[in-house]
Every structure is written in structure tokens, then in C-alpha cells.
Image: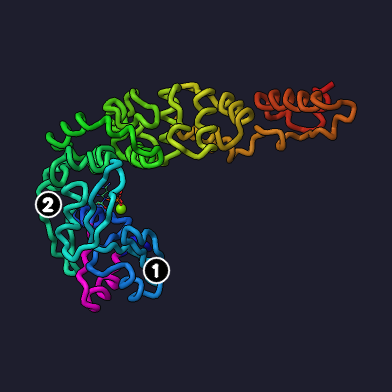
Amino acid sequence: MRNRKPDEILRRLLDAGFAAYYVGGCVRDTLLGRPVHDWDIATSARPGQVTALFSHCVPTGVQHGTVTVLLGDDRRAEVTSFRRETGYRDGRHPDRVQFVTDLSSDLARRDFTVNAMAMDLDGAITDLFDGRADLARGVIRCVGSPERRFGEDALRMLRAYRFCAQLGFWMDAETGRAIAACAPLCARLSRERVCEETEKTLVSPKPEYVSRMAELGLLCTCGVTHCVDLSRLAALDAAPEVRWTAWKVLQPALDLKAFRLPARLCQQAGRVCATWQPQRDTLSWKRLIAAEGWDAAHLAARVAQSGAVDEIAASGACVTLPQLAVSGRDFPQLSGRAVGDMLQALLQHVLEHPQDNTRETLLKLAK
Ligand code: ATP
Ligand code: MG
């Protein structure tokens, strides 16, 4: 159970004389009563002092001061030294990370008020930017001047909408105005980072925020500047491959490769889109399985919210060449492509007439 609270890590840091707090998303989600998937700890200990205290550490990002500490029981935390960031001349990376001794500078560098709270071992909250009030109001608001914060890291504009979508929150008016003004800065973001925020928004309960992000120009590095209404996606499985494919079906001109998604997903989503039919009967689903294979057909069925492909699989009905009661060896008189054409023709027949899938009948039909 990776999401149980790793209090022992906090306690060991405190016992060694360092300051240590839970910070960021885990504090926000604890206060909201939502499940916590990652525990982040901020500490006055330097990375070397952290690794000296624990026997199982992974140096996840030592230059940024982050060490992953593993407890023997599957619990873990990302432990990051208190730091301040300066520079950001490229609009996405701090020029310099400076380790500091106080919690307050570490909280001030964080993106939104609801993500900028700390919680100690007893559950006491440090809240320097009114994050609790924003949690109660359901508002995403920048820590400090929104223009300045978006100028430092343009990804925060996508994150702002991503958190609105995940939490069902509203955008603070000033933060929203700053996004409209700063949107062109998103042109310098890497596609991978844009993809990550887009995907988290797509699989959220409010995927329509992806359309808002696109229309504002926040997805321009991935070549998307307009987007259809995606609110219908909320009814589908929250699996990334289902949501991406459904978007492609609703907007066929969408180039998923521009999001640096895995080649296999791009290809399957492309096939589902190219063969898409809003309504299918069982025979039509069987033909889709025969033509595109099980994986693409399963994906199409999840996008269509149909159980047909599962039912066909469970029935054991013949829908692919290996399930046919004859094979190439039954046609020694044919050669090359003629064998494949014959088997395909027999399969098409069997899709419609399942009872004919016996060797005897098929050989008769072949003649
Ligand atoms: P989740 O993990 O549920 O998606 P999170 O709030 O934990 O949400 P992370 O991306 O894991 O988000 O980041 C952890 C914390 O680090 C955030 O809560 C925030 O305080 C800070 N943070 C992350 N990315 C940025 C950023 N680009 N600018 C400023 N602070 C950030
Ligand atoms: Mg997190």
C-alpha cells in the first residue's frame, strides 16, 4: 500500500534535528479528504544528510534536492530539501536552485495556494497564502503575482486548468486573466510536459477543460489551437488510451504523435478513428475484430461504451483466422496470395454464418 502515510520518515528527520513537513498535493488532498497517491516531504536537511539517515534511497533529482526514501513496506516519500528558485530565463527551469533553511521560502516557490501548505507530524497546517480558504471556496489561485509566476514557468498555466478539472474548482479571476495574457509563453514548453498535463486533464472528471486550454493557445507546442467540446468524454473509462482515442474520434484531424504519445497508441487510435461507426450491430463488431485485431476492437468498444467485443470473445465465436476450422495447409493446390484470399473469404462467410465453421463445410464452400 504505497499511499499509506510514511510518518516514520518524517519522525526520523525530526529526531535527527531537522525540520520536516508534508507539503504540496498530499496536504491538499488530505484536507479535501481525497485519497493521497504521493507523499512529498520538505526538510531542512540537505540531500546528503537525507541519504545518510535512510538505508533505502533513490537519488531521484539530487540537483534539485530530491531523494526518494523507501520504507521496507512499500511506503515511500519524495524528500526534498527546502529550496528557493531564481532565474527562470528560459521560462521553464530555474537558473539556480538555492537550498534554504526556512519553510516559508519553500512554500512561496510553489504554484498555487492550495498546493503551498505544509502539515507536520501532528497534522498542524502551515498556511501562509490562504490556501485553506481557497480550498473551501474551491478556487485555484497563484501564489504571488500570476504574471510573474507564469513568466517563470509557463507550465503552471496548464497546471491551473488541470487542477480545476481534477478538483472541480474554479479559476480565480486574476489568475485566469493572467493566463489569457501569458498564454503565448506556452510556445516554449516541451511537448512531454504539455502531454502530461493534457493527459491528467483528459482523464479527469472535467475533460472539457482540455478544450479551454487548446482555445487559449496553451497546447500550441503540440499543434493544437482549437478543440471540439470534450465534455462527453467524462462518461467514458478514465483510462488514458480511451480518452485520447475518444478525442481523436471526435476530432479526426488531431495529431496524437505531436503529444509524443507511444507509437502504438497513436496507431490504434488512428485505426479506431478511421473505422469509426456511431452504431454497430454484432456482425459489424465481428468484422471490426477480423479486420483490425482484438486490441483495436477492444479500444473501439470502450470508446463506444459497448460490451459487444467482450461478449464476442466470451462466446468463442470464430472472428480471426487462427480460429477458422481450416488453414493454409488445407489448400495445397493454391499458392501465395491465393491462400490468404481464400482464408479471408471463408472467414468473412463464417462471421455471418458461425455454424459453418467446420472443416467439412468450409472445404465444400471453398470448391
Ligand atoms: P498530483 O501529484 O496529485 O498530480 P501535486 O500537487 O502533488 O498533484 P506535483 O506535480 O506532484 O503535483 O507537484 C508536487 C508539488 O510541487 C505541488 O503541489 C506544488 O507545490 C509543487 N510544484 C509542482 N510543479 C510546480 C511548478 N511547475 N511550479 C511551482 N510549484 C510546483
Ligand atoms: Mg504529486
Instruction: Name which quarter of the figure residue 305 lies in.
Output: top left
| Image coords of residue 61 (percent x, y) | 37, 59
Q: Is the C terminus in the top left, top right, bottom left or bottom right quadrant? A: top right
Residue 112, compared with residue 326, is above or below; it is below
User: Which residues fall within the magenta stretch?
Assistant: 5-23
Instruction: Name which quarter of the figure residue 227 lies in.
Output: top left
The local secondary structure at tag 1 comes to: strand
Q: Which residue is mark 1?
A: 57
Residue 121, compared with residue 170, is above or below; it is below
Q: Is the N terminus in the top left, top right, bottom left or bottom right quadrant? A: bottom left
Q: Amino acid at mark 1?
A: Cys
Q: Amino acid at mark 2?
A: Arg
Given residues 227 and 284, the one toward you in this image is 227
| Image coords of residue 289 (percent x, y) | 60, 31
The residue sitting at 27% across, 56% down in the picture is 97
| Image coords of residue 212 (percent x, y) | 27, 29
Instruction: Name which quarter of the figure residue 201 lies in.
Output: top left
Image marks 2 and 1: residues in contact by CB distance under 8 Å: no
Q: Which residue is mark 2?
A: 132
